Amino acid sequence: MVAIPAEKLIDFVTDVFAHAGSSQAEARRIAGYLVTANLTGHDSHGVIRVTSYLRWLAQGNLKPDQSVDVLVDTPSLAVVDGRFGFGQTVGPQAVAIGIAKCKENGLAAVALRNAGHIGRIGDWAEMAAAEGLISIHFVNAAGSVLVAPFGGVERKFSTAPYCVGIPRPGQPPIVLDFATSVVAEGKVMVASRGGKPVPKGALIATDGHLSEDPAELYGPYSPEGPRDHSKGTGAIRAFGEHKGSGLALICELLGGALTGNGATRIGRPMTNGMLAIYIDPARVDPAHFFDGEVARYIADVKSSRTVAGVDDVLIPGEPEQRTRAERGKTGVPLPDETWAAIAAAARTVGITEERIRQVTA
Ligand code: NAD
């Protein structure tokens, strides 16, 4: 295990993407969001993704320095095409459009299609919350067919995340943000690279038996080699039995079909689609009942007596804030295998051995 200070890791990942063809500004933005995912504890959406982003770039499925195309533009609605740009570039562009329209009208929706991987959806809820706005996000990852529906053994859904952000004056926002699968694919990837194992029964084999072995998803793999889910035959299970499976379906229909990204299917490049709805609480509730009621209710929820072994009832977003505070001090922990895979990918775009050594020195 190596622990790398966040700033040092951001500088290194910036160098990697600048070598791979992104402008310096885009490279730093990608690095910033990836390292933030690590800082918030979501290693599945952190720098481990460098390897797949470079692969998609080389395949031409991801394009540097894109701007969204606005296809539909009304006072409260936009439909935007990410043009296969990095999610860390076209994602915030789409969110900024939603924020501007919501501030104008009190309510807005933005449908984003053909975005590169937009990473941790909580980033976009936090961006809206920083402007005082509530946001609801339905997302799919078309092309990334990984998840078996309730009662099925075949891959039909993506890990289709769902996210809601609620701002709180003077306090961090509430951010509920999760994949609608038992685990995000990246968590299987982390497990396959020596990180935290996936929970029991997170995966299902084609014969219906439950498993925790990443090889169900990736097929046989070497320690530093790529993880390609098209090589495996098993699936991740949808979370929450029929209810989670139903929410995954809704994410596919709203984040995929309605946005124009397309519901998940085999044989197309991995792109994220996101339907985001923005609500300005100040416009819904000029008397500011909401803020006080949220504060009162959260305190009440947190006052619950806890089960044995649990110190604290946490609200969505709190685990990420805690991990961020801790990793800000201790650095980003990366299993040796993950670091080796990132270093191997960095070499392919011309990063020198000396530069790689500096990071862990
Ligand atoms: P997860 O299972 O860790 O759940 C995270 C959510 O649960 C957060 O809202 C967190 O605050 C809350 N939480 C965690 N522990 C808690 C506790 N003890 N008490 C109360 N709340 C708690 O998340 P996941 O499903 O592994 O998803 C990880 C990330 O992957 C998310 O950021 C998601 O957006 C992202 N993702 C992205 C894509 C994509 O295509 N871009 C696909 C899937 C997932």
Image: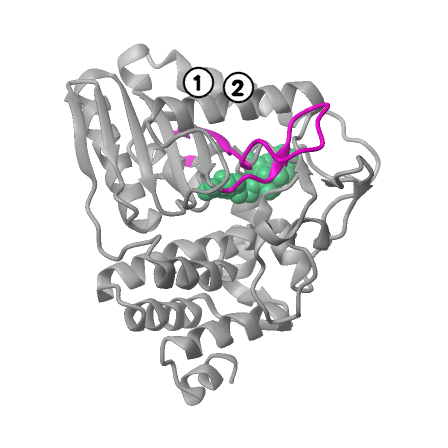
Where 158 falls versus 342 (above or below)? Answer: above
Find residue 22 and report its image quarter: bottom left
- Whether residue 40 is in magenta: the answer is no
Q: Which portion, as a residue range, is magenta?
A: 144-171
Amino acid bearing label 2: Arg
Q: Name the main secondary structure of what is drawn in magenta.
A: loop
Residue 140 in sight from this viewpoint: yes
Amino acid bearing label 1: Gly
Quarter of the image for the N terminus: give it: bottom right
Name the secondary structure under disc 1: helix
Residue at (30% x, 27% y) in the render? 111
Rendered location of residue 54, percent (x, y): 40, 63
Ligand 1's quadrant is top right
Residue at (67% x, 32% y) in the render? 313
Where 219 falls versus 310 (above or below)? Answer: below
Name the secondary structure under disc 2: helix
Q: Look at mark 1 in the image and give the residue it sits on.
A: 292
| Labels 2 and 1 touching (C-beta < 8 A) | yes
Give the camera-side residue of 336 and 68: 68
Rendered location of residue 357, percent (x, y): 48, 85
Q: Look at mark 2 in the image and give the residue it sits on.
A: 296
Local crowd size for mark 1, using a 10 Å CA cut-off: few (<14), some (14–19), many (≥20): few
Residue at (66% x, 50% y) in the render? 232
Give the camera-side residue of 329 and 231: 231
Q: Residue furthest front?
A: 267
* Lateral position of residue 57 relative to residue 9, left or right: left
Check mark 2 vs ligand 1: CB closer than 8 Å? yes or no. no
Give the camera-side residue of 310 and 188: 188
Rendered location of residue 355, percent (x, y): 41, 84
